[in-house]
Image (cartoon, rainbow, N blue to C red):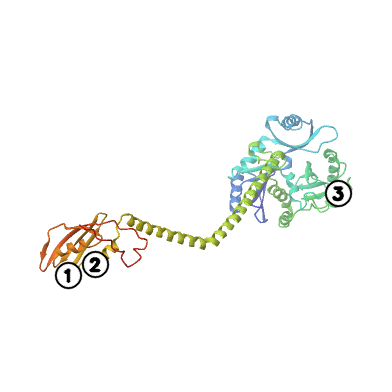
Amino acid sequence: MRRTRVGLVIEDDSVAVAAIRKGGSTEYFRLVANEALPARLEAQLRARRLRTKGIRIGLDRSRVVVKTLAVPRAAESNRHSMVAFELERHVPFAGEDTRFDWTPLPAGGDGLGRVLVAATEARTVDGALKLVEATKEAPRSLTVACHALPILLADRRPVRRAVWIHGRGARTVLLFLERGEVRLSRSVPSGDGGQMAHEVARSLPLAGWKKCDAVWVSGDESPDFRATFRRGELGMAIAAPPLGKTASRLMSRLPLEERASALLALAVAAGRRRPPLDLSPAGRRARALSWAAAFTAGMAVAAGALGLALLLVQGHAQRRHLEGVSAEIRRIEPEAKAVEELNADVHLQRRLLGVLQSIQAGGVRPLPVLKDLTELIPPDAWLQSVSMDAQGLELSGQATTASQLVPLLEGSPWLERVEFTAPVTRTQSHEQFRIRAAWEAPPTPSADSDASPSPAPRPERKKR
């Protein structure tokens, strides 16, 4: 069990409650039916911590009419109306006060469809639902308690046809099972084995059987029941039902007088989510998928699974491709870095070349001119600033005799029209001067003039 399940069986004078906890442990208690029953039931559930998402309800077989009806074969929607019409002749209460459900049975050879119907009064259904709702729990299903007994079998289909005799007090339930499915149930007065054998033999034609393969007995039957049953009309031995481990464990811990009710309550707790005969209102029933809806849902799930598998395969392929690309990037990363460094070096060289080309294009070659000035300026003079442009150069500095600098500069192969641009001023023993000179001729371009320390040959001086 994934969660705790609680089953409640409403009997004539009491309520039997069984719970199956997560892990398989079981609990059972019984409460007397009176006005304080809802409050005491809620207190017991809270004290035992039996909080679940809903309680399954089972009605005692004596409170429900169970019939096998033959109705014409028709569509599902029309068959419900046919079952309701046919049922009116078999129930002792008015049709508007009837609550019923039905399940199809294997068809006979007469061309009619056979259905198993369970019906009870509306007040019985409403009282059961209100009892559970008073405990602040939701009723999950409402069915005939004895119809849930096959869920407790260790093997759901142990024999082909079996009759389960379950005695409780003054009434005994006869449950007819075919491959583990309920085909008929009867509630008869309790009696000895011979009487029960007679009732079983009389009920076999009602189930459409000629004989059964096994007879099981459980509940309040006396020890001499087995011997008297063998001497009955069936002439066959009886055995205990092959219960599963959970049911057997609960039965071994209970007194004999409680085993009949406890077995029914346990079966209701472990019952199906959507029992075949559910008497609860249609709006409260658990939804059951049809074969078409289940097939459609299965196909949708399969399509989703295939789509997810395709996405996973594509993702794996892309991941493998990315891993290969990453490995190749790591392999060529040193070479890429070397190429980037070489590209940066080439860019720097191009910038330097551009600067040199711009200097040559401007016609200004400062190094040869400065070298020539160093040779022409006498030792007793020095320069404070030298500025050159495309038109000429301008010198400022101090000398012992500033006027003698003019003819010296005129003798330079680079300069002409040498003249003072400002009056000569004397400071102590030196004269402060500022001289401006034009270029005599544009410097001839030479590829190695800047690289060679020796100056270019001086052109001949023009005659004035």
Which of the two labelled residues, at mark 2 and mark 3, occupies the earlier sequence position?
3
- Distance (Cα) linking label 1 and label 3: 153 Å
Residue at label 1?
380
Earlier sequence position, callout 1 versus callout 2: 2
Q: In which quarter of the view is residue 247 placed?
A: bottom right
Q: Secondary structure at mark 1?
A: loop
Q: Residues within 10 Å of mark 1 (few under 14, many from 20)?
A: few
Q: Does 448 appear above or below 184? A: below
Q: Report the Cα–Cα distance between label 1 and label 2.
A: 12 Å
Q: Nearer the viewer, mark 2 or mark 3?
A: 2
Q: Position of residue 141 (x, y in %)?
A: 66, 42
Whether residue 247 is visible? yes
State the SS at label 3: helix
Q: Nearer the viewer, residue 289 or 433?
A: 433
Q: Which residue is mark 2?
A: 374
Mark number for residue 450?
A: none
Q: Residue at x 22, y 66 (%)?
A: 376
Three-letter amino acid code of the residue under disc 3: Phe
Look at discs 1 and 3 and give the one toward the viewer: 1
Q: Quadrant of the C terminus?
A: bottom left
Pointer 3 residue = 229
With respect to residue 199, does 330 lie above or below? below
Query: Type of residue at label 1?
Result: Asp
Circle 2 sits in a helix, a strand or a loop, which is it? helix
Depth check, front residue: 371 or 249 = 371
The answer to which quarter of the image holds residue 410 is bottom left
Q: Which image quarter: residue 447?
A: bottom left
- Confirm whether residue 187 shows in the render: no
Mark 1–mark 3 CB contact (< 8 Å): no
